[in-house]
Structure formats: C-alpha cells, structure tokens
Amino acid sequence: MVGLVVAAGLLAVAGRYGWHRDELYYLAAGLHPAFGYVDQPPLTSLVARVAYELFGDSLVGMRLAPASAGARLPESDARLPESDARLLASATVAVSAFPLATGHVLSTSTFDLLAWAALSWLLVRALRDGGRAWLPNLAWQSTHGWPRLGMASVIAGPGNGDSAPRWQIVPLQLVMIGLPLVPIWLAGLWSLALSPALRRQRAFAVAYPLLLAGLIVAGGKPYYLMGMYPVLLAAGAAPTLRWVRRRRPAARAALVAAAVLLTGATSVVLVLPLVPVRDLPGTPMAGVQPITEETVGWPELARTVSDVYRALPPAGRADAIVLAGNYGEAGAVDLFRHRLPLPPAYSGHNSYADWGPPPPDSATPVIALGLDESSLRRWFASMRPVARVDNGIGLDNTEQGRTVWLCTGRTAPWSAIWPRLRRLA
C-alpha cells in the first residue's frame, strides 16, 4: 500500500518542469549502447533507451521506471524487520527526501538504492541461511583503462556538481533522510550492533561506520551512502515500536507519527515540483534542491540553437554541427532534433567524448556554447556571439545566459582538438 501511494504521487508530478540534464545524457548513452561508460555502468542508459523506444520523448514515460523503483524501495526494505514493524519501516523510507528525489527523475541513484535494498536482503538471507551473491562490473572498466578511478578523483575535487566539503557529508546525509527520523535509524544502528536477536546481521553495524569513513576520506558525494539508511531505518522500526508500547503508548505513537508526517511534508515540498515553474525564481527551492534548477530551460536552449542554425545560409547548414561544453547541452540538442531543425551535437564531456570527434571533413560552421571564448579563439579563425540562452523565467541556473557562438575557419584538425576537449566531471 505504501508503495502504491508513492508511485501515484511520483507519477502525478512526473511531467512538471522538464528533463533533467542527466536524463538527457542517459538517453544519449542509451542510443550509443555499450557494456559501460566512463562514469556509469550500462543499466540506467539501457532503461532510458527502452523508455524512449516505448514512449518516445514523453517525460512521464521516461520517469515511469524511476517511479516504479521509488515505489518498490519502501516495500523492499520493509522485508528486513519483523512483520509488526514493516509498516513503520516502509513509511520511514517512503517519506525520506533522497528516495523521493531519485524516484522523480531517472538517475543511477534510482536503481542504486533499489540494488542496495535487494543486496541487503540477500545478505540477510545469506547470513541467516548461508550462501553468497556478488555482482561484478569490472570487464568493461579493465579494458578501457579504469575510467571510473579518474572519475572518482574528479568527483572528490572541489566545485563538482553535488560534491560537498568533507565536513558537510554527514549533515547533508541527515537532511537527505530527514532530521526527524534520526532517532529511528540510530536505534536501528544500536540494535544491529548490540541486540542478540540481530547478531547475525551485525555486519551492517560494522559496515556503516567503515563505509562512512571511507566516503569522507575519498571525498565522495554525500548521497553515495544513502543505500545504508533504509537498512538502518528498517532495523530501527522494531525497537521504535517497542519504545512506543513501553509507556504512554498513545503519546509516543503520536510523536513517531508526527516525525514521519513532518519528514514527508518537508521532503515533498523540497524535492518534488509542486511550485509553479514560473514562480521558481522567487523561491528558495532551486537553491535547496539542485535537481529542480537542472530541469528548467532545455527546450528554450534547443530553440535558441535552432534559430541560429536556421539563420545560416542553406549551403552552410549541410556540414554544420553543435559543439557543446557539457552533456546536458549536447543531450538537449540531440533530443529535440526530431522536433526542430538542428544539426548533430558533439561534446568532450564524459562519454560524449567517446562518440566524437565530428567527421574530419565536416563542421563548418560550428555553433558553440558552454565553452570558454579563449579556447574557441585558438581553434577557429573567426567567431562571433550570435545569441544568448534564456530559459524564459529568469531562473539563474547553469545554462542561463550562456553565449552561443558562430565559429568558422577551423585552424586545426578535429583529431588535434578533441583530446583538449575531453574532460570528466
């Protein structure tokens, strides 16, 4: 029942705002099928490809799988505690901010959380009954020079997307799960560590601090450990109910219910697209939840590029390309090519770099955006600003105000330019 409520809520708002930049990238990767990519295994991109084949560019269709995974997560973790605590375990997972956010948009974290839940259940069974299960994803990495190690180094660096200073990792995790639920998952950690009834599951109590310490030392993103918290919440459900029944049960039950409801209300407001999109610039929502601001303005960006392309003389359109600074820009151009007159997009960002460079005898002129002016001047004899990206609502996100350049007279072959365009971020 909890899962059905979550699914209904996520699908009700799935079509509001727009595509997230990562969704655009996953779809582009899905249209370039491979056993792996420099920054991700193949599953998420495969899901994006299947959704595109079934539903076209429908945003609701693309988010059907995330909503299903988001609905399945509470039910999966509810299998971990004893039966009378399963409803509370399911509810605490369902109302947490990060699971709701990953159920709203297609992302690697969407299926990562579900995989954590499935593997945790397998581990519980293995510890109880014996047996083992493992899921390697090494072959592609080993044959491509271990790009994930390079990606991990970039992620640990400053100013990279959702990265945060090491001292902020734990506080941000508490916010992403929900501050009112902290006593419940702490009770779960305590029980896993000390309860005789959970002695066979004690490995989780050992794993949590070790993984947290490793995450802090490595400088990973705060949400990388989110898969542990549903396990801790599930383990904390039974001791929480015992605490409720011990004394003044009505008052304590009301306190627990208030914690769940407050977390749910806060999470829904902060991570789901409830505020009308035109009102976003006047609210703190975009700053509080980075996912929000990254779902605004992609059709407008594509139309801006299309206007530049259509203004070219007919002879110049045949070999024109778009050179984008990041995979969101390139993905938006590629997605909307079936609706708007647009040339193919190329980028040196992450796996997009592996799908280039452009053909040696093409790409005159180049419509460039998201790249610094000094680099473009090194590679082209002539360039001029021809447009500026505007999302139409004045939201100050990453793409707002980007200059679109028209470049001609390429001064070096693509084979020389492309290595300098490659970047991981």
Image (spheres, grey):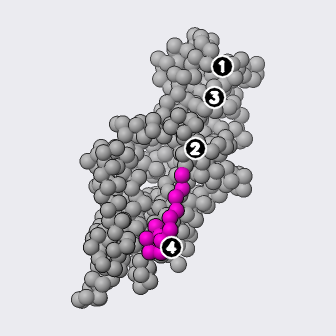
Q: Residue at x 71, y 41 (%)?
A: 339
Question: Which residue ends up furthest to the front in the rendered image?
Answer: 130
Check disc 1 and report the residue beneath it: 365
Q: List x then y, in percent, for residue 244.
A: 29, 84
| Residue topped by disc 4 | 75
Callout in the foreground (2, 4): 2
**Of pointers 1 and 3, the one earlier in the residue sequence:** 3
Q: Nearer the viewer, mark 1 or mark 3?
A: 3
Sequence-earlier tag: 4 or 3: 4
* Range shown magenta: 122-136
State which tag comes first along the sequence, 4 or 1. Answer: 4
Which label sits on residue 139?
A: 2
Residue 302 image point, x, y percent: 61, 37
Q: What amino acid is at disc 2?
A: Ala
Name which residue lies at 67% across and 21% down: 363
**Circle 3 sits on which residue?**
356
| Left or right, 183 with reference to 52 | left
In front of the other: 406 or 371: 371
* Helix, strand or loop at mark 3: loop
Q: Nearer the viewer, residue 333 or 415?
A: 415
Magenta stretch encompasses residue 316: no
Give the CA distance from mark 4 to mark 1.
54 Å
Q: Amino acid at mark 4?
A: Glu
Taking depth in this image into account, of 388 and 419 the one nearest to the observer is 419
Amino acid type, mark 3: Gly
Cα separation, mark 3 vs mark 2, equals 23 Å
Question: Looking at the image, can residue 403 be seen?
Answer: no
Q: Are marks 1 and 3 in contact (CB under 8 Å)?
A: no
